[in-house]
Amino acid sequence: MCVSCGCSHSEEHHHHDHDHTHEPSETEETRSVQLEKRILARNDEIAEKVHAQFQDLNIKTLNLLSSPGAGKTTLLETTLTHLGEQLPFAVIEGDQHTHQDAERIKKTGTPVVQINTGKACHLEAKMIWEALPQLPLPENGVLFIENVGNLICPAEFNLGEELKVVLFSTTEGEDKPIKYPHMFHEADLIVITKTDLLPYLRFDMDRAIEYVKQVNSKAEIIYLNTYEEGDTGFNTWCDWILGLARD
Amino acid sequence: MHELSLAEDVLEIVESAAQKEHLSNIAKVTLSIGKLSCVEPTALSWALESTFTNTIANGATIEINETAAQVQCDHCQHKYAAEDLFHPCPRCNKFGFTVLSGNDMLVTALEGA
């Protein structure tokens, strides 16, 4: 079936207004070749290479994913400031444009490289592979990859990471997990951010958790109130990072 | 619009297979897209048409077949066909499953001369 118009692409059927044709292919020389090639095979092969390099150096890599503005960079800034002396860290920043995030991370004293994806809406394993030589890799530590803020496209592309962490802020509304189920289904850890704003919002936390559980019954959930030391959620997050690195 | 990235990977697979099979003109490309993959077939089709322009597969017919998804309930281990990522188990009515198949995207056949 032709997915553009739903027709069965017979020779007689040429009247759609899109510009593809359904040329008859039954010439004498026409041959059929059966394949079984995964479209994402190329990305996954590079992701495996990246992952193998991280394993050799005992680096735990986290792919941070969320919509724009959920608080990924702020979480990184505070985490690196708080844990920077306890573990080696490095950061790969992904954005369509600008070096804003890399500049913020630099101020924490952490090695960082910025990838600008241009028109692309997600990071791919090849971009990570090419960025690695630009970084001192944090042996026995943690590498954060902050993906492009987007709840759709990055879900499909493995980057060679150990785990996927999805941030979900209370200002986005509680229904994001079921509106963007692929992203939440892929998450190993879900961090609900900006819970300090709950008194000012109509965010229904019980329903949010119910929605998360509908698409992902296994992911751990951490609630972040503020990003300050002493906040229960932030301490849980820091302990989670330290536990991962020592695993 | 990650479909454009995927379309470039499809073209690479098509070009490589065509070279191996000594095909210089591709008339049809058949894909199989799992029901639980994060791809919109119509968007992928348009991305492929655009990516194929002025290549060996210029104007090729694109056939996209959606394949069913098989999952296993995380609670009672029942295996069933899921329509989407929040399809509760028909046996225990609980949400949460492990995908066994139906989240992959494949190029399955080419036709050409």
Image (cartoon, coloured by chain):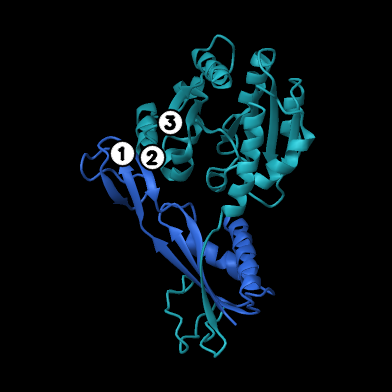
Chain colours: A cyan, B blue
Q: Mark 3 points at which residue?
A: A219
From the viewer's side, name the closer residue of A218 and A215. A218
The percent coordinates of residue A222 (x first, y second) are 47, 23
Identify the amino acid type marked 1: Phe
Q: Is mark 2 on a helix, strand or loop?
A: helix
C-alpha distance separating marks 3 and 2: 10 Å
> Relative to B36, does residue A234 appear above or below in the rendering?
above
C-alpha distance separating marks 2 and 1: 7 Å
Q: Quadrant of residue A208?
A: top left
Task: Say whether residue A218 is visible.
Answer: yes
From the viewer's side, name the closer residue of B17 and A8. B17
The percent coordinates of residue A209 (x first, y second) are 38, 30
Chain identity of mark 1? B
On residue A215, the disc is 2
Q: Do the residues labelled 1 and 3 touch (CB within 8 Å)?
A: no
Q: What element carries label 1?
A: loop
Q: For the view shown, which residue lies furthest in the right direction?
A: A134
Chain identity of mark 2? A
Q: Mark 1 points at which residue?
A: B95
Q: Is mark 3 on a helix, strand or loop?
A: loop
